[in-house]
Each structure stands twice: as C-alpha cells, then as structure tokens.
Image: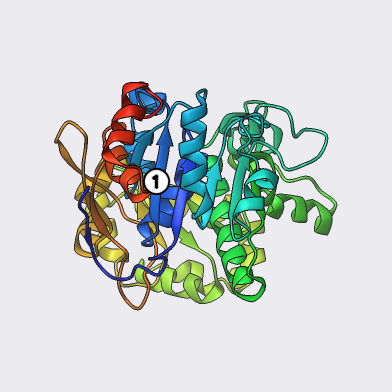
C-alpha cells in the first residue's frame, strides 16, 4: 500500500498492532495512523465483518480504517497465535476492543505480552472501565442511554441517541490520549503499561456539564429541547427558505446584533442590556426577532451575518460537507481509494500542527493485502510464508 504523506507525521516510527472491529477500536488506530504511526490491522481470515455492514454501518470501515496495513490471521490456530505474538513482541502499541477476556483466553493479554515486551503500551477499549459493570457488553447506544446523553438529546420522555457514533469515536480519542501519555511516560521509565478507555465513562464525562449544573444549582438539567437556555437568542430561525442558527452569547454581541439589524427599540431598552435579563424577557423579545429574520432568505441572512462576529450556521446535512468551500480549501477532506478502486473524499484528522493538516492520500487495504510483506519483515522465509498460507493460519 502506497501513501502520499504531507507533514506533519509526529508519530512516525511507532508501530501499532490492532485487534479491533466496528468503530471504537479502529478509531484509535485511524488517529494514530493519520499522525504517521505504522498501523497493522489484524483481521480474521476473510476480513473483518465490519467491511460488509450495510445501512448506517456501511461507512464504518472506510472512515476508521485508513492509513493501515492488513494481515488476516486465524487466531484459533497455534501458528496464527505464533505470528500474532511475533508481531507484538517488537511493537510499541497494541489496540483491542473485543469483549472482556476474548484476547486473554488466547494468551494475548497485557500481563502475558508485557513479559516479552516491557515497552508495550496495551490499549484496551471496552464498554466499561473496571467495576461492577465491566463484564457487560456495551454499544455506543447502550452507553448513551445509560450515561444520560440520550435523555439530554431527546425531548422529555423520548430519549434519543446522538446522530453519529459520538461515544465510539470520543472513546477512541480518549484511548489515544491515554496512549500518548503512556508514550511520554515510557520516555522516562522505559516501560509500557495498560491503558483503558470505555464507552460508559466517556458518556458520563461528556454529560458532566449537566451533572455540574445540578451540583451548582440544585436543579436537574432538562433535556436540551426543553432546556432553559443560558442565552436569550440561541436558536434556529426560519428564513424565507431554509433555517439558520444564530447565537448571541455576550452583551457585546447583543449590541452588534441590534446594530446589524437596526433593532433600535431593543437596544434602547436598557432593562435588557444584560444577558440574564434578556433570558427572563425572552418571550417578549423572540417574536419580534423571528418576524425580522423571516424576511430574509438563507443566503441573504448569511451574507449579512458574515464577518459580523456573531455565531451563525446554516443547517447542513452530512452530504453537504463534500462541497463545503472551507473544507475543500483547507485540506479538510482527503482522498481515499476503496478496495474496489473507487476514490472518495473523507474528513481529515481535525487538527493542524505547525500550520499544516496531517492529511494523507490512502488506499483501504483489501483483507490480508499486506500479509506477505508483514511476514517477510518478521523474518519468515518464502517457504514458511507459503506454509502459513497453505494451512490458512494466515491469508
């Protein structure tokens, strides 16, 4: 697999072995790979079933398995386990997100592997961190329901999961944070360690602001559709065609908003110059503002708001992002070639380092497409490679 790299690649030189499926674990490897690490994805014989998901799952594999190599190993065979252990013995990082105990039963647990590779950083992505729930099976949606996010997202009495795999991806991000912290500590100690991240605890961290609201005010947070906003104008407004979100989140922005839309009467009302007073007067203020905004088309409103310093946003759909002018002008999308040869554009890692985006053109590997070169790098002879493939321990 050839890839064209742009700087930065700060993790170049780190070798990652990945035993994952679905989203959370693969997201860890995808981020590390985007930053320049060598990521070897271990798939079952025939390839990870995530490759063939349909519907809402059809985008999982291309989104979270870029910048990786693939080797297919039969982990139920002794030869396959031997190959896996050879991969790991010189690796920097291992990532896994299978059910609790799944890799342990194969002798691929941290305690066993660290005996031969003391520098190994072993990232285990699970549903729950150690505790009473740790052996439960979790999914993104399970965590959102248990952790309070679905309650906060939907209207009262109708819990609703977020519109993407936000907990899987964020849990993967926390895994990367733990890995990078362990890499830094390894510089001082020379030893790796077990790093754990989870869906449930990630969800709880994300709704922590609502827990803090309860702690501070003594009142439970209402679901977002029924919340009392911290700001009077923080809403979606109907235009003549398509809606636009506008937020006025400071007193200085209130002045700008009134000046921009010639709301002289509202600015003249000194009783609502302060934010909390505007929140109390929201029922009086909003009808006038909604009537005003409804006179504009979406494009007219955006043109008026552009450069004003006021937060605003058209209501976009995922498919709109392919043509987004900002993303296309700023390396926000990168070219990915699918196994069938089709080239698509997918989001780049959303960071910049030294003023540059860490973008890479990549080709998604077919199942086992790198097996021979990976085995050769482990000093397997051609005859031994043929034997492994003939026995279907590796394909």
Q: Residue at x 36, y 42 (%)?
A: 65
Q: How is the image coloured?
A: rainbow
Q: Quadrant of residue 224?
A: top right
Q: Name which quarter of the figure residue 112 lies in.
A: top right
Q: Nearer the viewer, residue 110 or 65?
A: 110
Where does residue 195 sit, x and y in percent of width and height?
65, 53
Please tell me which residue is depicted at 66% across the width and 48% down the height of the picture. 196
Q: Residue at x 53, y 40 (%)?
A: 168
Q: Counting other residues with Cα less than 10 Å from the Cα at mark 1, is it few (<14), some (14-19), or many (20 or more)? A: many
Above or below 117: residue 191 = below
Label 1 SS: strand
Whether 149 is drawn above or below 75: the answer is: below
- 173 and 257: which one is in front? 173
Question: Does the rendering let one see residue 231?
Answer: no
User: In the rendered view of the protein, which quadrant contains the C terminus?
Assistant: top left
Percent across and percent down for residue 52 are 34, 23
Viewer-closest of 53 and 276: 53
- Residue under label 1, please give it: 40
């Amino acid at each position: 697999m050839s890839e064209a790299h742009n700087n930065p690649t700060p993790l170049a030189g780190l070798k990652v072995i990945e035993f994952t499926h679905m989203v959370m674990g693969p997201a860890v490897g995808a981020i590390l790979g985007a930053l320049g690490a060598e990521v070897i994805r271990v798939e079952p014989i025939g390839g990870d079933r995530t490759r063939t998901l349909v519907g809402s799952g059809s985008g999982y594999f291309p989104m979270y398995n870029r910048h990786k190599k693939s080797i297919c190993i039969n982990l139920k065979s002794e030869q396959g386990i031997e190959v896996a252990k050879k991969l790991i013995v010189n690796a920097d990082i291992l990532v896994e997100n299978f059910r609790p105990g799944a890799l342990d039963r194969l002798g691929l647990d941290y305690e066993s592997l660290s005996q031969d590779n003391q520098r190994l950083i072993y990232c285990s992505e699970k549903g729950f961190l150690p505790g009473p729930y740790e052996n439960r099976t979790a999914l993104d949606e399970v965590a959102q329901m248990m952790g309070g996010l679905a309650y906060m997202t939907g209207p009262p009495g109708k819990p609703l999961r977020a519109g993407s795999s936000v907990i899987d991806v964020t849990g993967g991000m926390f895994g990367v944070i733990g890995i990078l912290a362990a890499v830094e500590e390894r510089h001082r100690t020379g030893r790796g360690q077990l790093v754990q991240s989870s869906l449930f605890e990630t969800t709880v961290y994300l709704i922590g602001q609502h827990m803090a609201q309860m702690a501070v005010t003594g009142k439970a947070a209402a679901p977002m559709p029924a919340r009392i906003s911290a700001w009077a104008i923080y809403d979606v407004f109907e235009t003549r065609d398509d809606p636009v979100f506008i937020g006025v989140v400071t007193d200085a922005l209130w002045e700008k908003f009134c000046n921009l839309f010639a709301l002289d009467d509202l600015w003249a009302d000194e009783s609502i110059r302060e934010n909390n007073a505007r929140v109390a007067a929201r029922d009086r203020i909003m009808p006038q503002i909604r009537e005003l905004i409804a006179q504009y088309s979406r494009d007219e409103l955006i043109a008026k708001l552009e450069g004003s310093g006021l937060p605003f946003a058209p209501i976009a759909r995922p498919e709109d992002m392919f043509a987004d002018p900002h993303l296309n002008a700023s390396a926000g999308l990168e070219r990915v070639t699918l196994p069938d040869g089709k080239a698509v554009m997918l989001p780049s890692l959303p960071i910049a380092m030294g003023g540059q985006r860490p973008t890479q053109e990549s080709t998604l590997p077919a199942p086992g497409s790198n097996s021979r070169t990976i085995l050769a790098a482990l000093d397997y002879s051609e005859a031994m490679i043929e034997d492994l493939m003939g026995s279907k321990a590796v394909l």
